[in-house]
Amino acid sequence: MNVESQNRNKGKNIALWGLVFILLAAAVVGNSVFAEKSLLIRVVAVVIAFAAAAVTALQTIQGKALLTFSRESIKEVRKVVWPTRQETIQTTLIIFAFTVVMGLFLFLIDGALIWLVELITGMKG
């Protein structure tokens, strides 16, 4: 019975994805066919078709997994202890200062290496 149930679920899943693609294709083709109609009407029709496709996609196995993942992600984000404004500013300033120091260090190393190569080869850059 379990194998039969899985086969039905796979068949249902394939049918739902087929319906999703039909809805999306209908939105694209309908928008092209009714190009002479009002832009507002076409936009509303495309939005409705995309919404129907999204709702249908969420009924598939992959869609249900996406919903579960999204809910779990939201729970995890709520657990995060976010830094205060002051901590964020301090960290940003430290990173900026480190970047400036490293830039100067690399500039000096580059200049020293250029000087060394010129000294060894006798050629000016």
Image (spheres, helix red, strand yellow):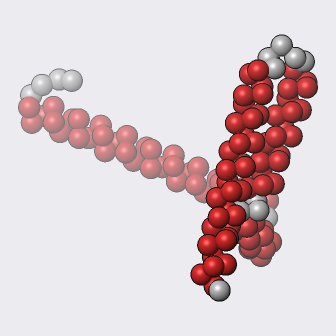
Picture coordinates of residue 42 (x, y %)? 85, 26
Horizontally, residue 70 falls left or right of residue 48, namely: left
**Which quarter of the figure has residue 15?**
bottom right
Q: Nearer the viewer, residue 63 or 120?
A: 63
Residue at image point 76% right, 59% down: 58
Check the picture and name the quadrant holding the N terminus.
Answer: bottom right
Outermost residue toward the left in this view: 121
Check the picture and name the quadrant holding the C terminus.
Answer: top left
Q: Is residue 116 visible?
A: yes
Q: Nearer the viewer, residue 46 or 100?
A: 46
Reply above or below: 55 against 75. Answer: above
Q: Nearer the viewer, residue 91 or 60?
A: 60
Residue at image point 37% right, 45% down: 106
Residue at image point 72% right, 28% down: 29
Horizontally, residue 111 falls left or right of residue 23, namely: left
Picture coordinates of residue 77 (x, y %)? 75, 69
Residue at image point 82% right, 47% down: 52
Q: Is residue 90 visible?
A: no
**Which quarter of the figure has residue 31?**
top right
Picture coordinates of residue 123 (x, y %)? 12, 25
Horizontally, residue 118 falls left or right of residue 68, namely: left
